[in-house]
Image: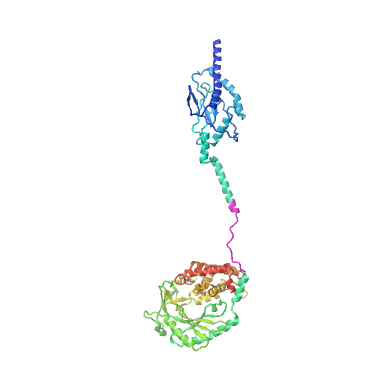
Amino acid sequence: MERGAAGRGAKKTTAAQPVKKDAAAAAAAASAPKRRGGRQGDGETTARPTTAPRSAKSKATPKKEGKGSAQAGKDVVPGGRKNSQKKQVGIPKTAGAEQAKVKVESEEKPIVSQTKRGCAPKENGPTQVMAEVDARRKPASQKTKPLPREEKGTTCTGGKASQKTREGAPKGEEREQAEKRNGPKEKKPGSRAKQECALRAMESDQRGAAAAAPLPPPPPQPVFDEAVLKDVLRKIKLKKEKLITASQRVNKIRDILVTAIKKEPCFSSIEVMGTGSYYEHVKVCNPNEFDIMLKVPNLRIELEPCDAGAASGAFYYVKLKRNPGRGALDKFLDDKRQLSSSTMLSELRHIIMQEIGEMKDVTVERKRPGSPAVTFRIENPPSDISVDITLALECRQRNWCDSTNNGLDIKGWLGAKVKQAYLNEPLYLVPKHVKDGKCYKENTWRLSFSNIEKSMITNHGNTKTCCETNSQKCCRKDCLKLLKYLLEQLKTRHENRSHFEKFNSYHAKTSFFHACTKWPKDDEWPAAKLVECFVRLLDYFLDCLKKAELQHFFIPKFNFFCEEIIEKAKCKKLAEAIESEKQNSFPVFSL
């Protein structure tokens, strides 16, 4: 028994020795110079200590020490490395060893309690803080996973737990040099859920900011009052006294000329048709222009399309069919049995010049290339009167030409019945010469719809009572007058008027017809909204100029602004001039 007690006492003493040795080893490791880990002495393995300057701002709480002999034997050195303990060999695993383990745990309790209260042991305080700082700064790839904590009741080899040393941790000086070269390391991003939440919040803020942002200001609109346009309309309205005086003089000369023309057998059946702006009641400013059409009625003819570049379904050659009692026209046939427009126009011009030569204050103007009319001028102070006499062939046939199939789109404006009535009207051909390159083909005839145009302007309402007495008034004709007056002023008063010579009032009238089909209802042209309606019509005409495309109202394939008729540069010049007038409240109206 005494021997057993002595043995047990000896074993207790032997088991208690590692605690003292462990404290000594920690002190020696803290004061030892830096060197690579390896074997030292008999069976000792030490970690490579790392020296790092102590930061005044580093006040991190030391890591809690785990329970058990393995955690109690760990000692932390600067650089975040855990010091490996000495390996004790030869201690047998007996009941005495178990008692020694209990003794060691009882002696370690004060140290563990200090760590839990946030007070590290004195010898480990600075080193523990630096280890915490280094551990936070390291990227995730270099951090060493913590060793699993040993459970109670496991055996301990000599009372010391073996511990793996972390490798690859940069030294304090090397870390500072790396930060100087590469800059401070980026902070570790949060979890994926936090990033997605932040992204959603940012997108929500952006949507809210976009919704709260004010809308861009509308484009500047022309600043002018309706009273300005009404003043212009009053100024360009024809004076009744002037109108009566001019029409009387024109009618007197017309009757004399028609009587002389009918004396010729080839023109014995001609009839007078009043066409143009004067008879359409859209004439502006002065009654200084009149258009008179002399038609040769009820001809049986055959039409052959012209293949010139600018023809586009509007120009034709005319062949006479059998016309009893019309043999006098045979003298105007050429070698191809085609009716020569130039020969017939020359004959008409010769008769008019003979009659007018005996009149006072009346002169015949020179022939204009490609013009279908004979023009004479009446001196009538303060302004002269210009009269165009145009010869026309009347052709009655079951259907119009194929080129007109998709034209006259007035079903939504004037109705299907009105359109069918117009399609039953005869066709008219005037001696207009088509331009082929730089030359004119003299034997061509152009389709004319003057009779239908006059009817559409006179009966312009979507309802039959539009603009009648005691009924709703519209501003269609007023808008057309303003557009014609603007074009006339630009042609005579603008600094670039030399570029606008080829533009005429028929272009304004064609744009007006297209606008009426685009906005067909009477309530879309109320008299109270003159400014809005005029600007809308003007914008449509501007769009045609910019695109260099204005389709014939009856012949869709024919473009008035094609390059062969009017150069695209001139269309652009006119568009720029109108834009300038629009933005400056039409100063040309006050000239």
- Residue 5: % across, % down: 56, 12
Q: Where is residue 127 drawn, in percent x and y?
A: 56, 30
Q: Nearer the viewer, residue 334 or 65?
A: 65
Q: Is residue 213 above or below residue 41?
A: below
| Farthest residue, direction left | 335
In the image, what residue occupies the spot 53% across and 37% down? Answer: 176
Q: Quadrant of residue 520?
A: bottom right
For the rendered model, the colour scheme is rainbow
* Residue 131 within the segment the image draws in magenta: no
Residue at x-position 58% and y-position 34%: 55
Give the residue at the far top of this rendering.
2
The quadrant of the picture occupied by the N terminus is: top right
Expressed as whole percent of the image width and height from the top left, the position of residue 414 reads 54, 71
Question: How many marks do you count on the picture?
Answer: 0
Decide which of 466, 338 is in the foreground and name it.
Answer: 338
317 lies above or below 88: below
Residue 50 vertical placement versus 443 (above, below)? above
Specify the segment rendered in magenta: 208-225
174 displayed left or right of 336: right
Name the magenta segment's main secondary structure: loop
Q: Is residue 520 visible?
A: no
Q: Name the residue at the front extreme.
A: 33
Q: Is residue 216 magenta?
A: yes
Residue 126 at x, y percent in the picture: 58, 30
Check the picture and name the quadrant holding the C terminus.
bottom right
**Res 347 seen here:** yes
The quarter of the picture where residue 61 lies is top right
Q: Is residue 472 left or right of residue 148?
A: right
